[in-house]
Amino acid sequence: DFPNYFLYIENFLYENIEVINNQGQIYYYLNVLTILLKSSELNSINSINFFNSTIQFTNFIFYLIGTFGLFKLLSKYNYKKQSIYISLSLLHFVPKIIEMRVLLKPEILVFSFLPWIILGIDCYFEQNKKTPFVLSLFPLSLLLTSKGSVAGMVMIFLFFKYLKKINKKNIKELILIFALFVLILTGI
């Protein structure tokens, strides 16, 4: 898959590269920013290692964001700190997590953003705080535009998780927030 996904990076770096799959490009754009920031290290001898290390660095940043989000989410659900630390320490060695950190695939955005999205939506339904909910719309829109399979899984998960919390009291607010969400999604 690497040659297919690397076309997105080449599309940003060079002008006349055509992308076929038409997936969301924020993940690839952020990788290109890392490449441009570290471009002084690039030469003809180390190009493969250079691109691998920049992709892994970008993925590691997303991984840190997701790990901190998981910490906050588990803390919110009243897990003991010691249990959270042990769980997150073990998570670092799960083969799928290692694979996610080294491959050029936008699925790492789900790991990075989903805990923060859940925290924002939970704040609305549990404490009636609108600001975290509205702020969670931005990463949600990035996820939904990143890849079709990601969009499907995330929407199904959120639908079943929060369907019972929608009632007559909050339906009007939710319709307005949904309109704002559509606006953000259209902009992206």
Image (cartoon, grey):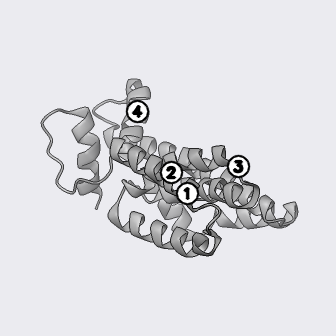
Which comes sooner in the sequence, label 3 or label 2? 3
Which comes sooner in the sequence, label 4 or label 3? 4
Which comes sooner in the sequence, label 1 or label 4? 4
Residue depth check, mark 4 versus mark 2: number of the one nearer the observer: 2
Residue depth check, mark 1 versus mark 4: number of the one nearer the observer: 1
Q: Position of residue 9 (x, y in %)?
A: 29, 42
The kind of residue on which mark 2 rests is Leu
Tag shown at residue 172: 1
Circle 4/circle 3 CB separation < 8 Å: no
Say whether residue 85 is visible.
yes
Residue with the mark numbered 2 = 176
Q: Quadrant of the C terminus?
A: top left
Residue depth check, mark 4 versus mark 3: number of the one nearer the observer: 3
The kind of residue on which mark 3 rests is Lys
Residue with the mark numbered 3 = 129
Look at 65% across and 47% down and name the residue there. 130
Circle 1 residues within 10 Å: few <14, some 14–19, many ≥20: few
Circle 1/circle 4 CB separation < 8 Å: no
Look at 61% across and 48% down and name the residue there. 65
Q: CA distance from mark 3 to mark 1?
A: 15 Å
Say whether residue 52 is visible.
no
Circle 2/circle 1 CB separation < 8 Å: yes
